Every structure is written in C-alpha cells, then in structure tokens.
Image (tube, helix red, strand yellow):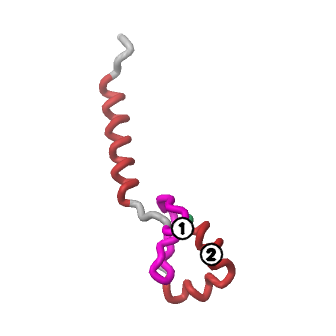
Amino acid sequence: MFDGYVPDNYDAFAAYDAARAAEEELLPTCDICGERIREKMYRINGETLCEECLDWKYGESVEDYMNDNFY
Ligand SMILES: [Zn+2]
C-alpha cells in the first residue's frame, strides 16, 4: 500500500502550512519586541504592543491608559 509517498496527506499539510503563513502575515506586530501578536493586542498612544511589552513599558499604570485605549 504505502510506497513512502502519500500525496493527500502531504498536500493537506502544505495547504495548512500556507494558510498558517498567510494568517501570520495578517497578525499585527509589537512595536517594541517586533513579535507577531497572537493573543491580546494593545494600542496605546499610537503604539501597538503585546501584553508582555505593555507590562514592561507601562507596568501598573496601565489601568489608566486602558480606560481610553483598550481595544
Ligand atoms: Zn512586544
């Protein structure tokens, strides 16, 4: 049955991979660390930040910013 080449599975995997890559392209990037943001994204003072950098940059004062700028 199997001769080492399984086109259907491979094609499905390749298609999945391409879809993931296209998805990645659409993700916003963090202005500080440059990573794609997969989960929560924050826009503060015109910057797009991931949660980690948000904490790092604004720390505990983030609550004040979030009232106006939380998306
Ligand atoms: Zn970041």
In this view, the residue in front, 16 or 59, is 59
In this figure, which residue is indicated by the disc labeled 2? 57
Q: Which residues are magenta?
A: 31-49
Query: Residue 56: x and y, percent?
Result: 65, 71
Q: Residue at x 54, y 63 (%)?
A: 33
Quadrant of ligand 1: it is bottom right
| Residue 46 relative to residue 62: left or right | left
In this figure, which residue is indicated by the disc labeled 1? 32
Query: Residue 71: x and y, percent?
Result: 46, 78
Of helix, strand and loop, which mostly describes the magenta segment?
Answer: loop
* The N terminus - image quarter: top left
Query: Residue 25: x and y, percent?
Result: 36, 56
Asked whether mark 1 and ligand 1 are closer than 8 Å, the reply comes as yes
In this view, the residue in front, 59 or 12, is 59
Q: Residue at x 38, y 14 (%)?
A: 4
Does the magenta run of residues contain 40? yes
Q: Residue at x 38, y 41 (%)?
A: 17
Does the magenta run of residues contain 60? no
Identified by mark 1, the residue type is Ile
| Residue 42 relative to residue 19: left or right | right
